[in-house]
Amino acid sequence: MLRIGIVDDHLLFRKSMTLLINSFDGMHVVIDAENGRQFLNQLQDTTIDVVLLDIQMPVMDGYETCKLLLNRFPDVKILIVSQLTSRESIHKIMELGAHGYFTKNTNPEQLELAIRSMHEEGFYFGLELGSVIKEAMLWENNNPVDVVNHKDLFSDRELQIIRMICNEMKSKEIAEKLFINIRTVESHRKHVMEKSNSKNFIGVILFALKNGILTIDEL
């Protein structure tokens, strides 16, 4: 059973999301909080797998909550659920290390896919994330980075796996396609995260875009 937390200051939204998620097979909402502080307090006594976290909240907003959560409970996967799509907010979310981003305008049917992807693959790379990353990249245009020689950084197999993940292939599918063990795929994922100094695989994708390893068209 996947244990889910919801953190949002709008009661109607939380209750609606709870009903929706509880209708998904193998999922149950175990934490319902109106701000980050209340959520972190509840988390002391309750274990969860994935949290749906809003950004704009009183007392403790999503940015601060995300930062504290990653430090204190690194195993919890963070799915940002927000209506904010500004370059500033998206850039900050990615830099903090959230594992996924889900806009409140997205079709609710995508939510189950997002949660399962977060749990199974460690991040959510959905249809809307391409535009989210584009916004983050536009925000950084005024802060150019030194382009590294990716041939010296990533192996050909690692680059192949990065591109396959960008095409929404799961580890099991990649293993079957490349005729390798799923543990080998997971090892490659871990290595590219370490090489790019990324908190999660979204960080790997951002790193690859910044350094010309991937193009937006490949997302």
Image: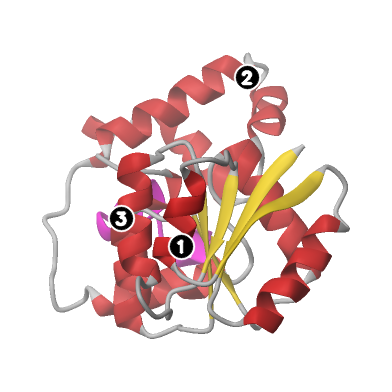
Residue density around tag 2, few if under 14, some if 14–19, many if 20 or more, within 10 Å: some
Residue 129's spot in the image, x, y percent? 53, 67
Q: In the drawing, does residue 144 fall left or right of residue 150?
A: left
| Circle 2 residue | 182
Q: Nearer the viewer, residue 41 or 138?
A: 41
Does label 3 or label 1 sit earlier along the sequence?
1
At x 57% / y 38%, what residue is drawn? Answer: 47
Does label 1 or label 2 sit earlier along the sequence?
1
Task: Please give the range of residues in magenta.
Answer: 204-219
The answer to whether mark 1 and mark 2 are in CB contact below 8 A is no
Depicted 34 relative to depicted 214: above or below: below
How far is mark 3 from mark 2, CA to CA?
31 Å
Task: Locate residue 62: give its quadrant.
Answer: bottom left
Residue type at mark 3: give it: Lys
Q: Nearer the viewer, residue 104 or 69?
A: 69
Helix, strand or loop under label 3 = helix
| Circle 3 residue | 67
How far is mark 3 from mark 1, CA to CA?
15 Å
Q: Is residue 81 magenta?
A: no
Helix, strand or loop under label 2 = helix
The answer to whether mark 3 and mark 2 are in CB contact below 8 A is no
Residue type at mark 1: give it: Gln
| Circle 1 residue | 38
Task: Locate residue 107: give its quadrant.
Answer: bottom right
Residue 39's spot in the image, x, y percent? 48, 58
Of tags 3 and 2, the one toward the viewer is 3
Residue type at mark 2: give it: Ile
Q: Nearer the viewer, residue 209 or 119?
A: 119
